[in-house]
Image: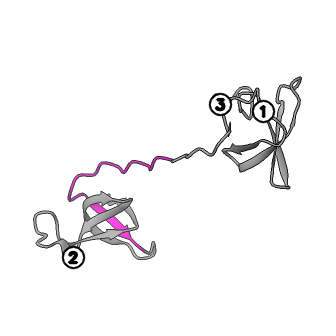
Amino acid sequence: MTTTFETAKVGDKVWGVENGWGEIQSINVSDNYPIRVIWGNYSNTTYTLEGKRAIAHNHQSLFWDEIEIKAPTKPMPSLEVDTKVLVWNDPKRKHNRHFSHFSDGLIYTFEGGCTSFTAMHEDDIISWKGWEVFE
């Protein structure tokens, strides 16, 4: 099957990055944007035969089938163990702690004034939602 829309027909189901599933409403090959797609009953959008929303776009945004778009997570900064940080779960209550590590988008710190040198148990490390480096 082709990734472009030269063989498209009115009524074909298509998938758009911005709107999900839609249906080709009309095709006008003499137009720069010959493919008109209707999204439900509320709006329509035109595309090139290459599935681009605008001729100048580098990437296709209309497809024959749903594609998976997975945004990468923002990389966590590189902090040295025991860096002094302010942490919180409630921004109104910040706590001074020493950095342990990042995991699953959370910051982990040593609890109760501990550092990597003085922490004795796993219970001495807890996670926080918010943080900033203590200057």
- Residue placed furthest toward the top: 30
Q: How is the image coloured?
A: one colour
Query: Disc 2 marks which amino acid?
Result: Gly
* CA gap, disc 1 and disc 2: 65 Å
**Is residue 38 depicted above or below 116 in this figure?**
above
How many discs appear? 3
- The residue to which callout 2 is attached is 112
Looking at the rendering, in which quadrant would you find the C terminus?
bottom left
Point out the stretch of residues depicted in magenta: 71-89
Lateral position of residue 64 relative to residue 132, left or right: right
Badge 3 density bin: few <14, some 14–19, many ≥20, Cα 10 Å: few
Looking at the rendering, in which quadrant would you find the N terminus?
top right
- The residue to which callout 3 is attached is 3
Q: Earlier in the sequence, mark 1 or mark 2?
A: 1
* CA gap, disc 3 and disc 2: 58 Å
**Residue 93: percent from left, percent from top:** 40, 76
**Is residue 79 depicted above or below 125 in this figure?**
above
Res. 34 in view: yes
